[in-house]
């Protein structure tokens, strides 16, 4: 026999979501404000509905846990030719790959289960004791919780309140970590666990164009540290030129500063992209030029009196010698994300 737990049960704690679409029998977390959904480009909404960086947690004595959820078989994972992000390679080198949910029990990795196209995610043979269950949700598909089944007679309880600093990570597919096989393998996930941070991943594949509405969202969210991964998407997709890119970045930061006047912000420029470093795009920008413009913008912000905005050159994080860890020339593998985590962890640690 099993005991059903409603998706709206107060014992379930979420992290990483900006807002929720909630009904009596479902909870769908998303990474934009649902009230603003129609104001965004459809491409950004597509990626924002993916549960990258999100977790759900609860305490339970149950040895078996069944997560009832809608986990679509996303076309981006299912095909080796479909690429919704124009200009980002001829296809997906992980084509046909599965999406996963990762289970951590009392902070320790315990299990992963495939989620694509399923309505049930089962974790079994867990310890018969009260324990903290944390599930990292699939980072390349959406997720709608329909309920949780636990064993009849077992208990469920809310996790102890967390005092972990809240980290908002804005950026591209590099921040969404779309090349990672599992959701807890991305560099943001690795750093958040290592430094005990509450992660809010605002990484959107091919959609980091400094949307002002996203700056407003970051401004209105609680945050103890903010990172901005910027430059690669505008260069590849030809959306910001030498006249507009630097001012756009400075305005993005100024909007955030309206409610976060002293919150540490770390801006890092593009990591190494072998085929884009000296390639002039349709608006006259190379990847090297993007880095130069970012550094100039942050220097100008510092000189204007903001000493809490910091710059990190992406070439110091993911270097030319790491190119084999980026097989499609755009997205690192899990090993590549570990390299990024190693490069950025000390920078973020200094700010918290």
Image: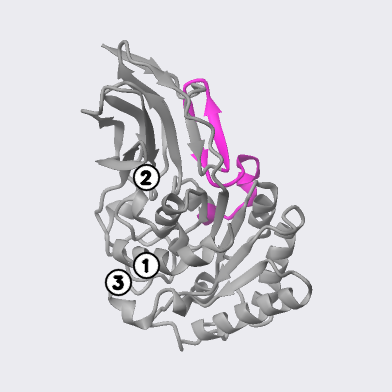
Depth-wise, is mark 2 or mark 3 nearer the camera? 3
From the image, which quarter does the N terminus lie in? top left
Query: In the rendered view, would you say 237 is above or below 296?
Result: above
- In this view, the residue in front, 258 or 205, is 258
Q: Is residue 121 left or right of residue 58?
A: left
Which mark is on residue 331? 1
**First of labels 2, 1 by sequence position:** 2
Q: What's the CA distance linking mark 2 and mark 1?
A: 17 Å
Label 3 neighbourhood size at 10 Å, few (<14), some (14-19), many (20+)? some
- Determine if the magenta segment contains residue 183: no
Residue identifier under label 3: 325
Q: Position of residue 69 (x, y in %)?
A: 37, 31
The residue under the point 44% across, 35% down is 56
Element at label 3 = helix
On the image, numbered disc 2 is attached to which residue?
A: 138
Count every numbered label the image shows and give the total. Answer: 3
Q: Which residues are magenta?
A: 18-44
Task: Please provide percent x and percent y for residue 264.
Answer: 64, 61
Q: Residue 103: name its quadrant.
A: top left
Give me the C-alpha separation between circle 3 and circle 1.
8 Å
Instruction: Mark 2 and mark 3 in contact? Answer it, CB < 8 Å.
Output: no
Q: Position of residue 77 (x, y in %)?
A: 31, 53
Q: Which residue is nearer to you in this view: 74 or 294? A: 294
Residue at (63% x, 50% y) in the render: 223
Q: Secondary structure at mark 2?
A: loop
User: Label 1 neighbourhood size at 10 Å, few (<14), some (14-19), many (20+)?
Assistant: many
Most foreground residue, 304 or 122? 304
Sequence-first tag of 3 and 1:
3
Badge 2 local density, few (<14 within 10 Å), some, or many (20+)?
many
Determine the image quadrant of residue 215.
bottom right
């Amino acid at each position: 026999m099993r005991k059903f737990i409603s998706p709206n049960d107060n014992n379930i704690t979420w992290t990483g979501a900006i807002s929720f679409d909630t009904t009596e029998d479902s909870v769908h977390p998303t990474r934009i404000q649902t009230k603003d959904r129609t104001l965004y480009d459809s491409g950004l909404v597509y990626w924002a509905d993916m549960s990258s960086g999100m977790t759900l947690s609860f305490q339970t004595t149950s040895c078996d846990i069944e997560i009832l959820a809608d986990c679509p078989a996303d076309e981006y994972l299912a095909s080796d030719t479909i690429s919704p992000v124009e200009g980002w390679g001829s296809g997906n080198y992980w084509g046909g790959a599965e999406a996963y949910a990762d289970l951590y029990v009392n902070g320790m990795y315990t299990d992963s289960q495939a989620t694509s196209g399923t309505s049930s995610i089962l974790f079994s043979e867990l310890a018969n004791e009260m324990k903290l269950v944390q599930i990292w949700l699939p980072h390349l598909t959406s997720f709608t919780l329909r309920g949780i089944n636990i064993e009849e007679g077992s208990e469920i309880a809310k996790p102890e309140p967390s005092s972990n600093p809240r980290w908002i990570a804005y950026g591209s597919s590099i921040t969404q970590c779309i090349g990672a096989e599992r959701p807890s393998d991305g560099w943001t996930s690795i750093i958040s666990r290592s430094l005990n941070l509450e992660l809010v991943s605002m990484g959107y594949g091919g959609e980091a164009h400094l949307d002002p509405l996203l700056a407003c969202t970051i401004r209105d969210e609680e945050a103890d540290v903010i990172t901005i991964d910027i430059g690669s998407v505008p260069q590849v997709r030809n959306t910001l030129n030498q006249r507009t890119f630097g001012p756009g970045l400075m305005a993005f930061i100024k909007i955030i500063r309206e409610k976060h006047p002293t919150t540490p912000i770390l801006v890092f420029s593009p990591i190494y992209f072998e085929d884009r470093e000296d390639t002039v795009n349709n608006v006259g920008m190379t990847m090297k030029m993007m880095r130069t413009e970012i550094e100039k913008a942050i220097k100008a912000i510092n000189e204007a009196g903001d000493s809490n905005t910091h710059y990190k050159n992406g070439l110091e994080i993911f270097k030319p010698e790491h190119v084999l860890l980026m097989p499609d020339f755009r997205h690192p593998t899990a090993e590549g994300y570990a390299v990024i985590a190693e490069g950025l962890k000390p920078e973020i640690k200094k700010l918290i």
